[in-house]
Image: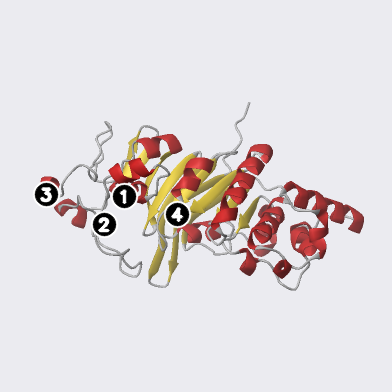
């Protein structure tokens, strides 16, 4: 039996905006039915990766494959037949829904663009079913987006993204623009839909509590490059890269006792500019463990227990740094 191709494959993806190196050689694979979280600070290039996947941006270099088909530079006509395989949910539902269109027309738009011939009655029934699947009543189809709450608008966005039954969903910070009170309900909805429909998902976020709840795998991005990849269990239990360790140390814990006992990781300076990234390891200007080699040599991607980390201090035998326990002076002399 021939194995099905992966939902998404990125090979050395590059996206430069003139001198700005937003994405600089990202390789990532998402198997069918898996949820991969792409995490990192604002400005790390996460959303740019997502927009390259759906071809809202045409990459400067590299390869994007959807279900084994190279879609990197397809013409607009040929790209249309592949667009139904991938959908995107944006961060701000208010900005991604046309305020002049009724919700029913917004949700039905992917059906129209894909060229599906349906009667008006069938289309309305399909829209009503999709709205029901995301927890909205059928009469919402006759309202405008501005008449809905933020959580309802994001549910409309999810319905629009899934009505074409995509194989891959790009969820770009889908809860960050919502009130805290509704974020959990939208995450629960995404988890339920993914379990029921079995689509693969690239979940772009900086919320590590959401990652722990929703993701199967994690890819950590810093200043346009991937610095670590692995399963959720592996990354949360034994993060290998100093940047990943710092992110996890900064994530709030529900247990106040554990929160007080946890040793903080202090990073120097702010995220450097993608106009002029640091030489060698891009994280070195903020890393408490940086030493001379970090400034002159780009770290190789070292395979570790089914994952990867790009750090000079990570070894294939499982040896890895720990910024929470080691003083910088021990490694910089």
- Local crowd size for mark 1, using a 10 Å CA cut-off: few (<14), some (14–19), many (≥20): some
* Side (left or right) of 18 relative to 281: right
- Local crowd size for mark 2, using a 10 Å CA cut-off: few (<14), some (14–19), many (≥20): some
- What residue appears at the point 60 percent right and 54 percent down from the top-left corner? 182
Q: Is residue 175 visible?
A: no
Disc 4 + disc 3, Cβ < 8 Å: no
Q: Position of residue 210 (x, y in %)?
A: 50, 47
Q: Could you tell me which secondary element the residue under label 1 belongs to?
A: helix
Q: Position of residue 128 (x, y in %)?
A: 82, 52
Mark 4 to mark 1 CA distance (whole Å): 13 Å
Q: Which residue is mark 4?
A: 206
Q: Could you tell me which secondary element the residue under label 4 belongs to?
A: loop
Counting residues from the start of the chain, the first of labels 4 and 1 encountered is 4
Q: Is residue 37 visible?
A: yes
Q: Quadrant of the N terminus?
A: top right
- What residue appears at the point 80 percent right and 60 percent down from the top-left corner? 141
Q: Which residue is mark 2?
A: 267
Counting residues from the start of the chain, the first of labels 4 and 3 encountered is 4
Q: Which residue is mark 3?
A: 329
Q: Position of residue 108 (x, y in %)?
A: 78, 59
- Local crowd size for mark 4, using a 10 Å CA cut-off: few (<14), some (14–19), many (≥20): many
Mark 4 to mark 3 CA distance (whole Å): 30 Å
Give 261 or 124, whichever is nearer the viewer.
Answer: 261
Q: Which residue is mark 1?
A: 246
Disc 4 + disc 2, Cβ < 8 Å: no
Q: Which residue is situated farthest in the front direction here?
A: 257
Give 61 or 6, whichever is nearer the viewer.
Answer: 6
Q: Could you tell me which secondary element the residue under label 2 belongs to?
A: loop
Display colour scheme: secondary structure
Counting residues from the start of the chain, the first of labels 4 and 2 encountered is 4
Counting residues from the start of the chain, the first of labels 2 and 1 encountered is 1
Q: Could you tell me which secondary element the residue under label 3 belongs to?
A: helix
């Amino acid at each position: 039996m021939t194995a099905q191709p992966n939902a998404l494959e990125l090979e050395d993806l590059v996206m430069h905006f003139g001198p700005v190196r937003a994405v600089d050689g990202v390789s990532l694979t998402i198997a069918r039915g898996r949820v991969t979280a792409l995490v990192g600070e604002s400005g790390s290039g996460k959303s740019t990766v997502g927009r390259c996947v759906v071809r809202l941006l045409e990459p400067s270099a590299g390869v994007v494959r959807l279900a084994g088909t190279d879609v990197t530079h397809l013409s607009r006509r040929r790209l249309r037949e592949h667009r139904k395989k991938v959908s995107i949910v944006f961060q701000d539902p208010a900005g991604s829904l046309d305020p002049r269109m009724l919700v029913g027309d917004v949700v039905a738009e992917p059906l129209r663009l894909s060229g599906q011939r349906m009667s008006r009655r069938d289309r309305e029934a399909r829209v009503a079913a999709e709205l029901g699947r995301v927890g909205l009543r059928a009469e919402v189809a006759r309202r405008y987006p501005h008449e809905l709450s933020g959580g309802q608008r994001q549910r409309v966005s999810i319905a629009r993204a899934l009505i074409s039954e995509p194989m891959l969903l790009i969820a770009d910070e889908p809860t960050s623009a919502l009130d805290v009170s509704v974020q959990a309900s939208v995450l629960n909805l995404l988890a339920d839909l993914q379990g029921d429909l079995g689509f693969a998902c690239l979940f772009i976020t900086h919320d590590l509590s959401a990652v722990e709840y929703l993701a199967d795998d994690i890819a950590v991005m810093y200043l346009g490059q991937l610095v670590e990849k692995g399963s959720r269990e592996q990354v949360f239990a034994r993060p290998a890269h100093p940047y990943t360790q710092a992110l996890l140390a900064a994530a709030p814990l529900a247990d106040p006792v554990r929160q007080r006992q946890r040793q903080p990781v202090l990073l120097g300076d702010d995220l450097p500019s993608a106009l002029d990234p640091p030489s060698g390891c891009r994280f070195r200007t903020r890393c408490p463990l940086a030493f001379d080699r970090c400034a002159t040599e780009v770290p190789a991607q070292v395979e570790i227990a089914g994952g990867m980390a790009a750090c000079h201090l990570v070894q294939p035998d499982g040896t890895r740094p720990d910024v929470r326990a080691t003083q910088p002076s021990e490694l910089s002399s």
